[in-house]
Image: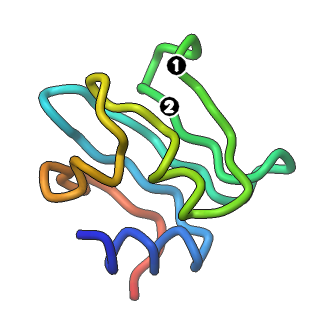
Amino acid sequence: MNDELKKLVDFGADIEFTCFGTDYTILPWTDDGISIGIQNDESQDACFETYEDMIDNYLIDGKKMRDVLDDIRITFTSGAL
């Protein structure tokens, strides 16, 4: 999943995914950087300068995103590679 997700982020595609039953959105084109958060819950939103920074520091169910990449299922993307 890491390669596919990284390519989509680098491409600038809106991404929706699910992990452990929770829906998330990644918007890689914002003025503040790569924005990620739980859909319809802004309290968990965060912005990161790079993809590596995001997967190393954003937590999903208390775990680094990097550690749960195999559990992520992309449900929508605005870009096709």
| Three-letter amino acid code of the residue under disc 2 | Gly
Q: Residues within 10 Å of mark 2 (few under 14, many from 20)?
A: many
Q: Where is residue 69 in the image (x, y as percent from the top left)?
A: 24, 56
The structure residue drawn at horizontal position 29% and vertical position 33%, both measured from the top left corner, is 63
Q: Which of 53 and 25 is in front in this view?
A: 53
Q: Do the residues labelled 2 and 1 touch (CB within 8 Å)?
A: yes
The quarter of the displayed image where residue 53 is located: bottom right
Element under label 1?
Answer: strand
The structure residue drawn at horizontal position 58% and vertical position 26%, both measured from the top left corner, is 45
Mark 2 / mark 1, whichever is N-terminal? 2
Q: Is residue 4 above or below residue 18?
A: below
Element under label 2?
Answer: strand
Q: Name the residue under label 1.
A: 44
Q: In which quarter of the image is the C terminus?
A: bottom left
| Three-letter amino acid code of the residue under disc 1 | Gln
The structure residue drawn at horizontal position 58% and vertical position 16%, both measured from the top left corner, is 42
Q: In which quarter of the image is the N terminus?
A: bottom left
Q: Where is residue 54 in the image (x, y as percent from the top left)?
A: 54, 51
Distance CA(mark 2)–CA(mark 1): 5 Å
- Residue sticking out furthest to the right: 31
- Could you tell whether 64 is left or right of 72 in the image? right
Q: Where is residue 76 in the image (x, y as percent from the top left)?
A: 32, 56
Q: Name the residue under label 2.
A: 37
